[in-house]
Amino acid sequence: MAFEHTSYGLLAATTQAQIHNIFTFVSSSAVMRFVSDVAQSSQRSTDTGGAGAYNTGTIAYTDWGTNSFMVVEPVNTYPGGGRWQAKILRASTTVINIQVDFSGSWNNRTFSTLACTSSATQWNKGSAPAAGDLMLITAANSDSYNGASMTYSYLRVLPHQTVAAEGSKFADGFYVGGYIPCLPNSDTRPACMLARIPKMGADLNNQWGALLNTCLSRTPVEYAHTTLDLTTAGKCQVQGFTNLFNQMYTVEPGTCESGSYVDTPMYLVRGSNILGAFDTYTMRCGANGRADGSVDSSGKWTVVNDIMMRTAA
């Protein structure tokens, strides 16, 4: 098992530099890899021109043109077999998208079956980054469950807008990967895609915890990952607390009696149902009282709005 995290600067204040950082991270990762397109002589699925030809050899950040993309997947399979795959596409000078196939069917430059996301979802804020911005990129397969016999893998990308005001420093990003399912013997391919603002607050603006009418995040509607459903049934949220009346709420864990901050587990929910939870090497429910981008006393968790993201092993 492995945990990987890198904080990148930008070679330029462009979406080209942002997507190149993702490429650089995956290129050296032991958790993630580029998909080999079997129908295209098993070439690496990276296309900086978006014009029908995969790249071979090295890539510079300035090579990433309009509609350029990469397709990535975890090295490890689901406990039930197979892998999720994600296409990350630079649509323009201001927009970067993600498209996820939870059944992992990329072949001949397309997804042959789309389980959950049928089209590209914009995960960035819709503008070029600012000079001095960072990117926090993490991949891990260290969280285990069901007697340590099962694991899940994830890739998380969080642009860090260093010059933005407090509360706006983390305004875009995505998470694609697994969680600990409530029913591990049935849900053997746990996976979700969380897109746009990494925040639990169930209110507005396409947050990871947004209410269903504004939610961009998706999860398969059945365990086999063979169907497509972009209605309410396929939407999911992150939340930090559930009460006895089957309603999900954001909770501010606050402090304990000694004055120290207390974090609580983070759930993945669909409607009023809990699908599972995220574990030690992924994320937890945090509190807004801490400054965005700060690291906790253990040096292992970074404050991202009201979420604590694991950023060190």
Image (cartoon, grey):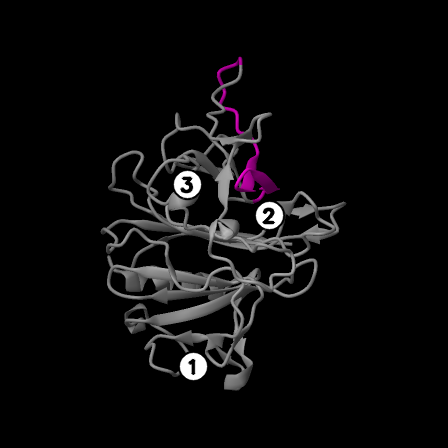
Residue range (magenta): 257-281
Name the residue at 60% across, 61% down: 225
Residue 245 visible in the shown view: yes
Mark 2, residue position: 179
Mark 3, residue position: 210
Nearer the observer, disc 1 or disc 2?
Answer: 2
Residue 302 is inside the magenta segment: no
Q: Secondary structure at mark 1?
A: loop
Q: The residue under label 3 is which amino acid type?
A: Ala
Name the residue at 42% across, 33% down: 306
Name the residue at 42% across, 79% down: 57
Count of numbered labels shown in the rendering: 3
Q: Position of residue 204 (x, y in %)?
A: 34, 39
Q: The residue under label 2 is which amino acid type?
A: Tyr
Q: Position of residue 218 (x, y in %)?
A: 49, 53
Label 1 crowd bin: few (<14), some (14–19), many (20+), radius 10 Å? few
Left or right: 165 in relation to 312: left
Q: Residue furthest top?
A: 257
Mark 1, residue position: 56
Label 3 crowd bin: few (<14), some (14–19), many (20+), radius 10 Å? many
